[in-house]
Amino acid sequence: MSTSGWVSDLNYVSDDASYMEAILAGPLLSLFFTCSLSTLAFSILIRPFVTRHGHTSWTRKQEEDRSKLNTTFVTLFVLYLSYLAGSGRSGLQQIIKGTDPKLNQLLDITPILRAGPSPPFWLSNRHIQFIPWMLQNELHRVGLLGGSLNMEYYNFTVKDCIKKTRGEDKILNCEYDDSMDQVVNVGAFPPFEDDSLPRDAPIIFVAPGLRCHSEDMPGQTVMRAAYGAGYRTVVFNRRGHHPDPQGPLLTSPRFNLFGDVDDMEQAYWHVKEKLAPPGTPMFLHGISSGCAVVVRALSLWDKRRELNPAAKTPGFVAAVAVTPGYDTSKVLLPSRFRWPYNALMNDAVKDHFVGLNAHVLGGYNSTAMEDALAAPDLQLFLNAAAPFAGYDDRHAYFDDTNPVKDLHDINTPIYVLNSVDDPCCNIDNLFETSPYEAHGGDTYADIVRRSQRGLVAITNGGSHCPFLDGGMRNMLARDPLGGWMLNSWADSSIVEWYGAALKVYGEERARMGREHEVENALDEAGDS
């Protein structure tokens, strides 16, 4: 596997067999670590005590055997520390930022962005980080850890065309068809009716990850951290996504694995016009696969605003993308989204999107459904499912939806988090040369450097989303809802980014969309 020059010292795993060994090594060495500590504690603390008080005696043979056992466990313990030292790192690798001088001002007031995560050494490995993080996520989801989120759901209907086409103004130029209608919802925490925050508290508008939803985006900790800082989180549960695994099922043959820009715009206006008071600042937030729709939406909406400032266009103070994979035509290939995660998620999305909705999808395009179910990996599943997203084939799908295509058109301040050790989104994706003519042979990192307000923080460790932090002494952080939660550098830096963006860009960016709020208020007054 090729690597970029600046990460040439990384020890990438070259094949699935060695990758499996790398994954199994962590838990096995953790077991040896536990055994070695237990043996050493017995030898140093307990055995001398019981021997001194005459409770037992030890023969020379027993002493020799125990000495050999201690040596073995100490050796394994040293190997474990060596494994961690070689596989998990802390701190920041580098920051790539755009040309706007205000980014320097923003960085000056957010020192955490320049620090990077510092996980406890025994949790620094990229695979091991998933274990406590996923356990916490599940305990939060079922209500056994921390205070309840008390989330409120607001239903509405999104509409779409049978075949999507988009004009040069970046707006759909096809007719909506009722057969593509779907009831979806947004989940808000705290609810807009909850008086624990002002009704006009800043909103973080979230596109969750693959198969994820408002109660596990994945995880809830960023919602909790944001609430503690005075933000309301609103999660768009797009088509096929819902906290209840039994529903709502698809009623129309339309879903997009990475999310649909046009559906998200309808969700934005529902929140902006029906739920949030006029003037409420909004941020756009993508997690994992949800980054694709966030980045694509920003490129389309920012360009639309540039072409026609009077056009009705969503606007945000700033945005965040947590662990994006960049070029969606390649990101889910087994060589990039590695085993076992590719195989596990491939089976999961087949069950979730196709298995639960076969009666709807099969009646619309049985060939596409069969191809999707037969796909041996996630990328081929995505390619096969293109007709269900509104496109004739994968070429038309990526031409309209690939988030890197118009990356250069984004001028919304956006903070991107990537980790060198991410097992699901290869860091080389960022340094890949763009195939699009408009980019002139630049890499995506080069495009960020030439952008107005892009900022990418590349950490040495963090895995795919956890970014555990705090070292040995501060691995837990206070949960604003009560109790404790894992300390996450991603959560902390994101909340500080939003606060800094409000200070640096707030008034300039918050003005966007207010003219349409006035128009909407006048329309409602006329209707009444």
Image (cartoon, rainbow, N blue to C red):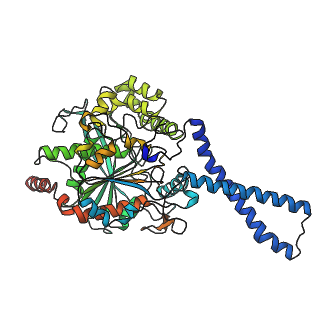
Seen as rendered, the residue at the extreme top is 367
Which residue does the image show at 43% across and 25% down from the upper left? 371
Q: Is residue 50 above or below residue 423?
A: below
Q: Nearer the viewer, residue 459 or 184?
A: 459
* x and y, in percent, of residue 303 in the image: 18, 44
Name, please, the residue furthest toward the left: 526
Toward which corner of the image does residue 238 lie, by quadrant?
Answer: top left
Is 118 above or below relative to 394?
A: below
Q: Is residue 111 visible?
A: yes
Relative placement, left or right, of 426 versus 14 is left
The vertical placement of 359 against 92, above or below, is: above
Q: Position of residue 495 (x, y in %)?
A: 35, 62
Please say whether residue 202 is visible from this viewpoint. no
Q: Nearer the viewer, residue 454 or 331?
A: 454
Q: Is residue 411 left or right of residue 464?
A: left
User: Which residue is depicted at the point 39% across and 22% down?
Assistant: 367
Question: Residue 66 lies in what quarter of the image?
Answer: bottom right
- Counting from the top left corner in percent of width and height, residue 326 is at 36, 42
